[in-house]
Structures are given as structure tokens and as C-alpha cells.
Image (tube, rainbow, N blue to C red):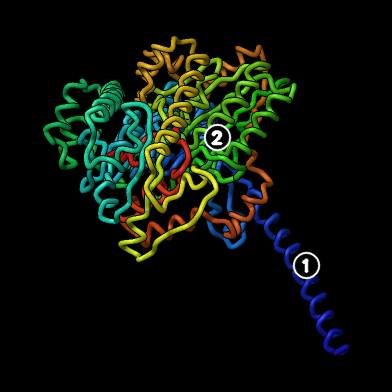
Amino acid sequence: MRSFLKFFLAAFVALVIFSVVAFLLLMGAIGVASSPKKVVVPANSVLVLETSQTYKEQHVSANPINNYIGRADGAAAGLYDAVRLIQHAAYDDNIKGIYIKVDGNGSGFATNEELRNALAAFKKTDKFVYAYGEVMSQHAYYLASVADKIYLNPKGGLEFSGFAVQYMYLKGLLEKLEIEPQIFYDGKFKSATEPLRETQMTEANRVQTTAFLSQLYGHYLQGVSEQRKVDTASLHRYANDGLIQEPSDALHYKLVDGLKYDDQVLDELRKKLNIDGKDDKVNFVSLNEYDKATDISTTGDNKIALIYAQGDIVSGNTEDDDKISSGAYIKMIRNAREDDDIKAIVFRVNSGGGSALASEVIWRELSLAKKVKPVVVSMGDYAASGGYYISCMADSIFAQPNTLTGSIGVFAVLPNLGGFFKNKLGVTFDGVKTAQYADLGTMSRPMNDAEKHLMQQGVDSTYASFKSRVVAGRKLSGAVVDSIAQGRVWSGEDAKRIGLVDRIGGIQDAIACAARLSHAGTYQLEEYPDVKNQLGKILKLLGMNDDETSTRLLKKELGDHYEMYIRVKRLKEMSGQVEARMPFDLLFQ
């Protein structure tokens, strides 16, 4: 026995030592691999912007493992990084122009607007912007339409067919499964629960969707019209009559400047850059490479906090990049509030909402910050429902014309799964309780009238609180807020008209406003969340906490059924709590 213990302990100690050494070696290798490679931008270069890239709000960190094994590191510039890089390139002597690779569209309306405005400003320096694509999606074309020259592959295609929104309705599915979605909501336009209780759009939802979709489409046509010198009525006719079917149609109706293959576009770029040799390469520099070669940080005596809030609003303290968790954001906002060097806060919101309680908690912390320094909100693609809840107290709110915002309304869903368990699975439930409402919230039976009354009271109370926050923050009367609330979604353009938004503008406009309000003079940006040295991010990069990998695998496995899976999963997540959320199945086409 002693001999066994002796060998066991020796083996155990050796294993511990080996594990520690291996971990240290791995961390050292990651440290070396994650050191950014020096990128030098040669003279006569062209910056490349890809429309298919998804521009998240914040910089996506490089994967050090990919770097170590010689693959692309996976880093991606955030939206505001991209805007600043384009601005920097305008005055960089080594960058002669921008080449837009047009394909699909990875970003939302307001994100594209931000990038498009940066490209338009770049053109004013007399540097060129060229665009080329084989198959151009409609939304990608909007970004490309700002270019001096747009070229389409002779055998490719350009989508130009107008906008559509489609909702997926689950009521029939739930009925077949004998699942009863017990729903409580406030706001006649609050359509987030509509797919669970209807088989088609309600009239109220049709009215609001038609209104904001028309606003988005009108803005789209106006933007294309200004750049292509074709009136909006003609553009609308092209789409309505289905006139753009072949590449030759796009050329005939002046949506593109020529039909060329990739090599022909490269030849034209060589001429533009005065490159004599036909075989000499054009120095293309991707946006991510340019990010590594360029310092876009600001310097100054003061600081302005730029806090990115992207994704669903949830309670708790998660570091998920696509979640706005109340615990994590309380800490960030409080740090910015208590730091005397930080003179103002810019809160960048890109969210369709989520938990009403988490939204209230974040609202409270921002309200405390507003008492000691200016708070300015910049809205992205969405700042609706809970996303508007956490925005409404700001000193000033900026949105793009095609931001979707408002949706001031709340709801709660508690599924009754009793029939599903009994009739589909053969499972029944029974039990005892010591008080009338001890099992309120169970999914094993339908709610009685008294329980339904309590649930509706909770929803009504939350809705009243939401509206009171808007009344106080926007300096509007209760009657006005009630008339523009009701869960209705508004475009940024309409939101400005009715008083939910102060100004049309992007992130930089909001930062400039914050600097003016705080008399900051020269300043540097302090960006949150901190993308550096987070253990969660390291684990994610190592594949130990990789939600993106799981998502990719699910999409591959489920195919066309993935969207339905997401909606059923969201129903489970929403169950039993009051939500301030946009329609979760808003699908743009």
C-alpha cells in the first residue's frame, strides 16, 4: 500500500508540474503569436472595403492560435474603427483610392449609412472610389452607389427589386404541439408576441411596418438618386416593373458604369495609378491590414468614454460580445462616472431590447452618470424597446435616418405545456402548495383568472414605468408619449420628427456633441468594454467558450430550419419575465 501511494503521489506531482509548464508554454506561444505583425502600407496603395463583412460595433480581436499556425488571424475592425480608418486614408499619401468589393451585405441599414457617409467624405479629397461585383445584393449596392465608378460582371447580376419584410408565425405550430402561449402585453403595436398569437399580420402591425419600411426605402432611393443622377420616381419604376434582370439592364438604366470582368477592372486601376506593367500588381490593402498599420487613437488632456452596447439586454454579468448584461454595464458606466478624467459619456446602442428589468437597471446607472457629466446616445441599426429604454435619459440622442427605434411597449409570455406533456409525451404533473400563488409561473398547467390578472398588472406597471422614463428624459407630456408609444417602431427620421431623437448623425457626431457639452477641448477616447486581456475572450479564442462555432454548426445542421429554432429558443428565454423587445422575427429582404 505504501508503495502504491508513493508511486501515485509521484505521478500526481509530475502531472501537476507538466500541466503548469504546458500552460505557461502555451501562454507564451500565444503571447508571441498574438503580437501584431508589422504592416507597412506601400506607396500607391488602394484600400479595400468588402460589403460582405459584418461590421460589429467594436473591434473583433485576433485569434492568436490562427496566427501561430499561419492562418489569417480573424481580426476585424469595428464600425467606428472602419469610419476612422477611411477618414485617415483620405489624408494618407500612400493611399490613392478605395476599392469596394461588392457582394452580399453583412451589415444593417444604419451601419451601411455610417460607412457610406465616410466614403462620401473620402471622395471630397479628390481620391477615387471604385466598386466592382459579380453579384450585387440590393443593400450592398446602396453602399457601392457612392463610388465614382461601379462595374458589374458581364454575366453577373444586380438585385434591384424594392424592400420587403417577412414575419414568421408560430401559432399553428404551437397548436399542433398543444402548447398554449399565455401572453400579456401593453401597446397595440407591440408585435413581438404577434407570431405566437396570430397566423398573419394584425392591421396595427401592417400599418407600422408599412410606415417604417416606406421611410427606409425612400431614404435608399434618395441616396442612390443623388449619386447616380437618376430621379427617385424612375428608380422606383425600375424596381416596381422588374426592369433590372440582366447586367445589360443595370447598364442601360445607369445603375452601373460598365460591364467588366475582374481583370479589366484591375487594368483600369493600373491606369488610374500610373502602373505601366500589365503584370504589375496593384497594392491592395485590406481594411484589417490598414488597421494594423495605422494609429487612429486620439490624444488629449481629457477623456470621453465611448461605451458600446450591442445585442440582447439581459440580467446578470456575462462578457458575451453580443449581450448587454446589466451587471457588466453597471460596472462600466459607474467606472466612467467616477473617473474625474472622463468628462462625458457616449453610449452607443445597437439593440432591439430584451429584459425590462435589466433595461431599468442600466437606465438607473446612466441617470446617475448624467447628474455629474454629459451623457450622449448614438443609435445604430436598432435602438428599440429596451434599446430605447436605456437611451431615453440622455442629454442628446443621435440616430441615422434608417435606424429603427421606439417600440415603447412591454410583454410577458408564459407557455402552458400541460397539453404537450400529457398528450405528446405521456407526462403528467401533481403536487401540493402552502399558498395560493406558490406555483405561479409553472408551465405544467394553464393559469387561472386571478393569476392572469396578476401577470397583466406586472406588465402594466412596467409599461407605466417605461413611459415615465421617456416623459422625464425627453421632456414630453404623458399624453404625447402615450400616443407615440404603444409599442410602435419608428424610423430614425420619424423619431426625430416626433421628439424621440434629437439629431440625425453618426458616432462621430455624438462624440463631438459630448465634447462640446463637457467643454473637453482636446480629448482621448476611453472605449468600453475593454477588448484586451479578458480571460473570457482568451478562452473563446482557444475554442473553450466559442458560441460562434456552435452557431455555425447549428446553421449547417439545421439549414433553413435554423430561423425557426432561434424563434422557439427565444420563446423559452422570454418565458416568465417582462420583456421590452422588438419583434424577434423581423426579416428584411
Classify residue 395 by image quadrant: top right
**Helix, strand or loop at mark 2:** helix
Q: Residue at x 40, y 41 (%)?
A: 413
Residue 73, numbered label: none
Residue 267 lies, with reference to residue 227, above or below; the image says below
Residue 323 lies, with reference to residue 559, above or below; the image says above
Could you classify mark 1 by the number of other residues whose Cα lies within 10 Å: few (under 14), some (14-19), or many (20 or more)?
Answer: few
The quarter of the image holding the C terminus is top left
Q: Identity of the amino acid at label 2?
A: Ala
Q: CA distance from mark 2 to mark 1?
A: 42 Å
Could you classify mark 2 by the number of other residues whose Cα lies within 10 Å: few (under 14), some (14-19), or many (20 or more)?
Answer: many
Q: Identity of the amino acid at label 1?
A: Val
Residue sitting nearer the eye, 548 or 46: 548
Q: Residue at x 22, y 42 (%)?
A: 199
Q: Residue at x 34, y 34 (%)?
A: 144
Residue annotated with mark 2: 358
**Foreground tag (2 vs 1):** 2
Residue 125 shows in this picture: no
Residue sitting nearer the eye, 490 or 321: 490
Residue 21, numbered label: 1
Outermost residue, left side: 241
**Helix, strand or loop at mark 1:** helix
Expressed as whole percent of the image width and height from the top left, the position of residue 79 reads 50, 35
